Amino acid sequence: MNENLFASFAAPSMMGLPIVVLIVMFPSILFPAPNRLINNRLISIQQWLIQLTSKQMLAIHNQKGRTWALMLMSLILFIGSTNLLGLLPHSFTPTTQLSMNLGMAIPLWAGTVITGFRYKTKASLAHFLPQGTPLPLIPMLVIIETISLFIQPVALAVRLTANITAGHLLIHLIGGATLALINISAATAFITFIILILLTILEFAVALIQAYVFTLLVSLYLHDNT
Protein backbone atom coordinates (compact mmCIF):
# COMPACT_ATOMS: atom_id res chain seq x y z
CA MET A 1 0.00 0.00 0.00
CA ASN A 2 2.79 2.45 0.85
CA GLU A 3 4.51 1.66 -2.39
CA ASN A 4 1.60 2.99 -4.45
CA LEU A 5 0.61 5.76 -2.06
CA PHE A 6 1.53 8.55 -4.46
CA ALA A 7 0.88 6.63 -7.68
CA SER A 8 -2.45 8.40 -8.21
CA PHE A 9 -0.66 11.78 -8.27
CA ALA A 10 1.62 10.85 -11.17
CA ALA A 11 0.75 12.51 -14.47
CA PRO A 12 -0.97 9.88 -16.67
CA SER A 13 0.26 8.99 -20.14
CA MET A 14 -0.96 6.92 -23.06
CA MET A 15 1.52 5.17 -25.35
CA GLY A 16 4.27 7.25 -23.80
CA LEU A 17 2.46 10.56 -24.47
CA PRO A 18 1.13 12.73 -21.62
CA ILE A 19 -2.63 13.18 -21.65
CA VAL A 20 -2.82 15.87 -18.98
CA VAL A 21 -3.97 18.42 -21.57
CA LEU A 22 -6.96 16.26 -22.48
CA ILE A 23 -7.84 15.80 -18.80
CA VAL A 24 -7.61 19.54 -18.19
CA MET A 25 -9.87 20.24 -21.18
CA PHE A 26 -12.45 17.60 -20.21
CA PRO A 27 -14.38 19.66 -17.58
CA SER A 28 -15.40 22.17 -20.27
CA ILE A 29 -17.61 19.45 -21.78
CA LEU A 30 -19.63 19.29 -18.56
CA PHE A 31 -20.91 22.86 -18.92
CA PRO A 32 -22.84 23.06 -22.20
CA ALA A 33 -23.76 26.46 -23.55
CA PRO A 34 -27.53 27.07 -23.70
CA ASN A 35 -28.78 27.08 -27.30
CA ARG A 36 -32.54 26.87 -26.78
CA LEU A 37 -35.22 29.39 -25.95
CA ILE A 38 -36.32 27.33 -22.94
CA ASN A 39 -33.52 25.56 -21.09
CA ASN A 40 -33.78 22.22 -19.31
CA ARG A 41 -33.50 21.88 -15.54
CA LEU A 42 -29.77 21.10 -15.55
CA ILE A 43 -28.79 24.22 -17.49
CA SER A 44 -31.25 26.33 -15.47
CA ILE A 45 -29.65 25.17 -12.20
CA GLN A 46 -26.19 25.75 -13.69
CA GLN A 47 -27.07 29.33 -14.71
CA TRP A 48 -28.70 30.03 -11.33
CA LEU A 49 -25.59 28.87 -9.44
CA ILE A 50 -23.29 30.92 -11.69
CA GLN A 51 -25.42 34.04 -11.24
CA LEU A 52 -25.59 33.55 -7.47
CA THR A 53 -21.83 33.06 -7.15
CA SER A 54 -20.97 35.94 -9.47
CA LYS A 55 -23.35 38.31 -7.69
CA GLN A 56 -21.81 37.46 -4.31
CA MET A 57 -18.21 37.60 -5.53
CA LEU A 58 -18.49 40.78 -7.60
CA ALA A 59 -20.52 42.80 -5.08
CA ILE A 60 -17.39 44.47 -3.70
CA HIS A 61 -15.94 45.42 -7.11
CA ASN A 62 -16.25 48.62 -9.06
CA GLN A 63 -16.97 48.76 -12.79
CA LYS A 64 -13.37 48.05 -13.74
CA GLY A 65 -13.13 45.05 -11.43
CA ARG A 66 -16.34 43.57 -12.84
CA THR A 67 -14.70 43.23 -16.23
CA TRP A 68 -12.97 40.18 -14.70
CA ALA A 69 -16.33 38.45 -14.12
CA LEU A 70 -15.93 35.94 -16.96
CA MET A 71 -12.39 35.08 -15.85
CA LEU A 72 -13.41 34.54 -12.22
CA MET A 73 -16.47 32.43 -13.08
CA SER A 74 -14.45 30.31 -15.51
CA LEU A 75 -11.80 29.83 -12.83
CA ILE A 76 -14.18 28.64 -10.11
CA LEU A 77 -16.00 26.30 -12.53
CA PHE A 78 -12.72 24.81 -13.76
CA ILE A 79 -11.20 24.24 -10.30
CA GLY A 80 -14.45 22.95 -8.83
CA SER A 81 -15.12 20.51 -11.67
CA THR A 82 -11.55 19.15 -11.74
CA ASN A 83 -11.60 18.69 -7.96
CA LEU A 84 -14.88 16.78 -8.13
CA LEU A 85 -13.80 14.65 -11.08
CA GLY A 86 -10.64 13.75 -9.16
CA LEU A 87 -12.76 12.03 -6.52
CA LEU A 88 -13.87 9.40 -9.04
CA PRO A 89 -12.05 6.05 -8.78
CA HIS A 90 -8.94 5.63 -10.95
CA SER A 91 -9.04 9.28 -11.98
CA PHE A 92 -6.37 11.99 -12.03
CA THR A 93 -6.74 15.35 -10.29
CA PRO A 94 -4.77 18.12 -12.03
CA THR A 95 -5.10 20.40 -9.00
CA THR A 96 -2.87 18.08 -6.94
CA GLN A 97 0.04 19.26 -9.10
CA LEU A 98 1.78 22.30 -7.62
CA SER A 99 3.15 23.26 -11.05
CA MET A 100 -0.35 23.55 -12.49
CA ASN A 101 -1.68 25.53 -9.54
CA LEU A 102 1.27 27.90 -9.79
CA GLY A 103 0.51 28.19 -13.50
CA MET A 104 -2.96 29.43 -12.58
CA ALA A 105 -2.02 31.55 -9.58
CA ILE A 106 0.99 33.47 -10.93
CA PRO A 107 -0.62 34.93 -14.11
CA LEU A 108 -3.81 35.89 -12.25
CA TRP A 109 -1.85 37.48 -9.39
CA ALA A 110 0.44 39.26 -11.86
CA GLY A 111 -2.59 40.56 -13.75
CA THR A 112 -4.08 42.07 -10.60
CA VAL A 113 -0.75 43.64 -9.57
CA ILE A 114 -0.12 45.10 -13.04
CA THR A 115 -3.68 46.45 -13.07
CA GLY A 116 -3.05 48.11 -9.72
CA PHE A 117 0.22 49.73 -10.80
CA ARG A 118 -1.41 50.93 -14.02
CA TYR A 119 -4.59 52.47 -12.64
CA LYS A 120 -3.77 53.07 -8.93
CA THR A 121 -0.03 53.66 -8.93
CA LYS A 122 0.13 55.76 -5.77
CA ALA A 123 -2.17 53.46 -3.78
CA SER A 124 -0.24 50.38 -4.92
CA LEU A 125 3.08 51.89 -3.91
CA ALA A 126 1.58 53.03 -0.59
CA HIS A 127 1.02 49.36 0.38
CA PHE A 128 4.78 48.95 0.67
CA LEU A 129 5.03 51.63 3.37
CA PRO A 130 2.19 52.09 5.90
CA GLN A 131 1.50 55.65 6.98
CA GLY A 132 3.28 56.82 10.11
CA THR A 133 6.13 54.31 9.89
CA PRO A 134 9.21 55.39 11.89
CA LEU A 135 12.16 56.34 9.70
CA PRO A 136 14.54 53.57 10.91
CA LEU A 137 11.95 50.89 10.11
CA ILE A 138 11.25 52.03 6.55
CA PRO A 139 13.81 49.75 4.77
CA MET A 140 12.77 46.70 6.79
CA LEU A 141 9.04 47.26 6.20
CA VAL A 142 9.54 47.77 2.47
CA ILE A 143 11.40 44.44 2.29
CA ILE A 144 8.73 42.66 4.36
CA GLU A 145 5.85 44.05 2.28
CA THR A 146 7.65 43.14 -0.95
CA ILE A 147 8.18 39.56 0.25
CA SER A 148 4.54 39.28 1.36
CA LEU A 149 3.42 40.51 -2.07
CA PHE A 150 5.44 37.88 -3.92
CA ILE A 151 4.34 35.14 -1.52
CA GLN A 152 0.66 35.62 -2.43
CA PRO A 153 0.62 33.42 -5.58
CA VAL A 154 2.72 30.75 -3.85
CA ALA A 155 0.27 30.70 -0.93
CA LEU A 156 -2.64 30.37 -3.36
CA ALA A 157 -1.09 27.39 -5.13
CA VAL A 158 0.23 25.64 -2.03
CA ARG A 159 -3.11 25.97 -0.20
CA LEU A 160 -5.04 24.35 -3.05
CA THR A 161 -2.43 21.62 -3.60
CA ALA A 162 -2.11 20.73 0.09
CA ASN A 163 -5.84 20.53 0.77
CA ILE A 164 -6.68 18.40 -2.26
CA THR A 165 -3.64 16.13 -1.84
CA ALA A 166 -4.27 15.59 1.88
CA GLY A 167 -7.85 14.57 1.24
CA HIS A 168 -6.88 12.08 -1.45
CA LEU A 169 -4.19 10.57 0.76
CA LEU A 170 -6.63 10.15 3.65
CA ILE A 171 -9.17 8.44 1.41
CA HIS A 172 -6.44 6.16 0.05
CA LEU A 173 -5.14 5.24 3.50
CA ILE A 174 -8.55 4.66 5.08
CA GLY A 175 -9.71 2.68 2.04
CA GLY A 176 -6.63 0.46 2.28
CA ALA A 177 -7.17 0.02 6.02
CA THR A 178 -10.78 -1.02 5.42
CA LEU A 179 -9.72 -3.72 2.96
CA ALA A 180 -7.03 -4.97 5.34
CA LEU A 181 -9.44 -5.16 8.29
CA ILE A 182 -12.13 -7.18 6.48
CA ASN A 183 -10.36 -10.48 7.17
CA ILE A 184 -9.38 -9.48 10.71
CA SER A 185 -12.47 -7.87 12.22
CA ALA A 186 -15.68 -7.29 10.30
CA ALA A 187 -17.04 -4.87 12.92
CA THR A 188 -13.90 -2.72 12.83
CA ALA A 189 -13.89 -2.82 9.03
CA PHE A 190 -17.52 -1.65 8.99
CA ILE A 191 -16.72 1.29 11.29
CA THR A 192 -13.76 2.21 9.09
CA PHE A 193 -15.99 1.99 6.03
CA ILE A 194 -18.47 4.43 7.62
CA ILE A 195 -15.57 6.79 8.32
CA LEU A 196 -14.51 6.45 4.68
CA ILE A 197 -18.00 7.39 3.47
CA LEU A 198 -18.12 10.42 5.76
CA LEU A 199 -14.64 11.47 4.64
CA THR A 200 -15.67 11.17 0.99
CA ILE A 201 -18.68 13.41 1.63
CA LEU A 202 -16.36 15.87 3.37
CA GLU A 203 -14.00 15.79 0.38
CA PHE A 204 -16.87 16.73 -1.94
CA ALA A 205 -17.42 19.80 0.22
CA VAL A 206 -13.68 20.56 0.38
CA ALA A 207 -13.43 20.31 -3.43
CA LEU A 208 -16.05 23.04 -3.85
CA ILE A 209 -14.84 25.15 -0.91
CA GLN A 210 -11.25 25.19 -2.16
CA ALA A 211 -12.40 26.28 -5.62
CA TYR A 212 -14.38 29.10 -4.00
CA VAL A 213 -11.51 30.12 -1.69
CA PHE A 214 -8.97 30.21 -4.54
CA THR A 215 -11.27 32.36 -6.70
CA LEU A 216 -12.30 34.57 -3.78
CA LEU A 217 -8.67 35.36 -2.91
CA VAL A 218 -7.94 36.27 -6.54
CA SER A 219 -11.06 38.47 -6.41
CA LEU A 220 -9.80 40.17 -3.24
CA TYR A 221 -6.39 40.79 -4.80
CA LEU A 222 -8.22 42.34 -7.75
CA HIS A 223 -10.35 44.48 -5.43
CA ASP A 224 -7.21 45.84 -3.74
CA ASN A 225 -5.82 46.90 -7.12
CA THR A 226 -8.85 48.40 -8.86
Image: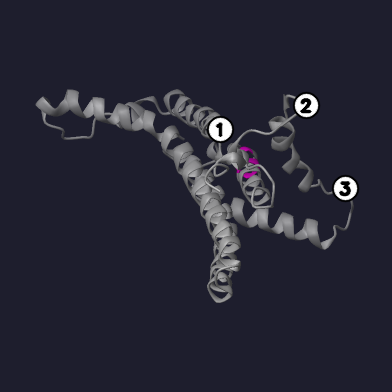
* Magenta segment boundaries in residue numbering: 71-75
- Residue 77 position, x and y percent, is 65, 46
Query: Residue visible at 61% across and 44% down?
Result: 79
Q: Is residue 195 visible?
A: yes
Which amino acid does the dot numbered 1 rest on? Met
Callout 3, which amino acid? Asn
Q: Name the residue located 88 percent from the left edge and 58 percent from the top edge.
A: 38
For residue 8, above or below residue 113: below
The image quadrant that residue 208 belongs to is bottom right
Pointer 1 residue: 104
Where does label 3 land, which residue? 35
- Give the mark, 2 or 1, whose residue is nearer the N terminus: 2
Q: Quadrant of residue 195?
A: bottom right
CA–CA distance between discs 2 and 3? 37 Å
Give the residue type at disc 2: Met
Residue 19 image offset from top left, x and y in percent: 73, 31
Q: Nearer the viewer, mark 2 or mark 1?
A: 2
SS class, disc 1: helix
- Disc 2 element: loop
Q: Is residue 58 above or below residue 39?
A: above
Whether residue 187 appears in magenta in the rendering, the answer is: no
Locate residue 87 relative to residue 168 in the image: left or right: right
Residue 137, labelled with which disc?
Answer: none
Does residue 57 show up? no
Q: Which residue is tagged 2?
A: 15
Q: If you read the primary sequence from the N terminus, does the residue marked by circle 1 or circle 3 appear first?
A: 3
Residue 114, position in %: x, y?
47, 24
